[in-house]
Amino acid sequence: MKKQFILLACCGILSVAACNNPQKMNSSNADSVSTAAYDTADFHKDVDGKPVNLYTLKNKNGLEAVITNYGGRIVSLMVPDKAGKLTDVVLGYQKLSGYQKDNDPYFGALIGRYGNRIAKGKFKLDGKEYSLAINNGLNSLHGGPTGFHKRVWEVVSSSADKLELKYVSADGEEGYPGNLTVKVTYTLTDENGLRIDYAVTTDAPTVQNITNHAYFNLNGEGSGTINDHLMMINADKFTPVDTTLIPTGELKDVTGTPFDFRKPTAIGSRVDADDAQIKAGLGYDHNFVLNKKDNSLTLAASVTGPATGITMDVLTTEPGIQFYGGNFLDGKDSDGKSAKPYPHRTAFCLETQHFPDSPNQPAFPSTVLKPSVTYTSTTVYKFSAK
């Protein structure tokens, strides 16, 4: 029988869940594929004068998600494999200090104000030009060097199955206009769903593109390559990029290219193809234009880890999804949860989003947020194993 486990991310529902454990925590199944460990006590400290902790969400079926309010990061996600053994499917560090490093690759983080890149860190809004923090070559990436991923989020409420986080980004932070209030809720249900709800408001016109940057390996974090994972992306088009990974503005048909994942295909089967866009991204680091007509919740992607049989379906209300194949993981860190380095292409990200550089691309879906509007977004990660 096929067993289903759901990780969902929705907007508009803003209750939260959390349980704390002051001791070092290991996988709840000693025989699980991943024997990840993290030091809970190390996460219990003040950062920038604000309290940081871990929050463990569990349900009656044994599904478990561990989240820290430092960057709103998913530290661990234990999912049953085809044999019913719990497997940690997200990359992360053993200690809080790992997430505080300057070269932290955004493991499990909430990303904002703007997920992905803005060309040369500049955009115009209502006739005024704004200059953002530059942290990725010539461009601004993921909200700047001290974006949401480096902030301590307020814990609004917590319980055994919900965690509500809040962050107020001040006018001018990293160069963005307006005081932005962001609420994010993680909810774990007895139906094995981890739901993330986003709700964003502003007191002045601004741009925003919040997402989550979890790194997945469905064979278990620290288990090796993801090139053997089978992936489907429900997109007829993608947005080509220049050599700095900024979209050119074109919406290109995937037919006949290494970006055609409309049928399940091994991630690594064409990752080193002699293709200009593969070379530009050093592999896959591209936004896909999802096949949808509105902001309804629809299937965006599906990925299967062959060793565990775990499948992750991604559903979203967003118009795009960034597929990143772990091209910049280099194996130099040795403080991953499994005490193993994370080498090149040993994880993938599927970041649901509006398109990169949208503030400079008038043909792309708008990321402008006005004071009269509450931005909401829904993403669902649905797990099954067979």
Image (spheres, rainbow, N blue to C red):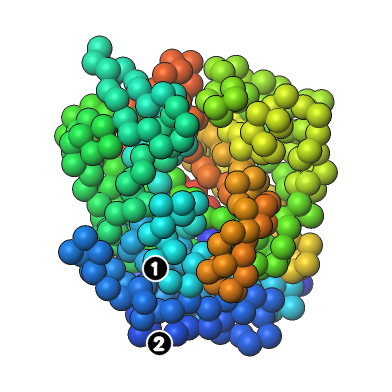
Image mark for residue 96 = 1
Type of the residue with mark 2: Gln
Picture quarter containing residue 201?
top left
Type of the residue with mark 1: Leu
Mark 1 or mark 2: whose residue is earlier in sequence:
2
Residue at image point 64% right, 45% down: 327
SS of the residue at dot 2? loop
Say which of 234 and 167 sits in front: 167
Left or right: residue 294 versus residue 251 is: left
Question: Which x, y percent locates residue 126?
Answer: 25, 15
Give the quadrant of the C terminus: bottom right
Residue at image point 29% right, 43% down: 200
Question: Which x, y percent locates residue 13?
Answer: 34, 55
Q: Residue furthest front?
A: 332
Q: Is residue 289 above or below residue 160?
A: above
Say which of 112 and 308 sits in front: 112
Count how many numbered circles sit on residues in the image.
Answer: 2
**Which residue is label 2 attached to?**
23
**Mark 2 neighbour class, 10 Å CA radius: few under 14, some 14 to 19, many 20 or more:** few
Q: Is residue 269 above or below residue 279?
A: below
Left or right: residue 285 versus residue 230 is: left
Query: Could you tell me how far apart the alpha carbons at marks 1 and 2 are, in whole angstroms?
Result: 14 Å
Q: Residue furthest top?
A: 127
Picture quarter containing residue 287?
top right
Question: Which x, y percent locates residue 153?
Answer: 27, 58
Q: Is residue 310 visible?
A: no
Residue at image point 69% right, 60% down: 311
Residue at image point 33% right, 34% down: 133
Give the quadrant of the N terminus: bottom right
Question: Which x, y percent locates residue 241?
Answer: 60, 24
Say which of 272 and 8 sits in front: 272
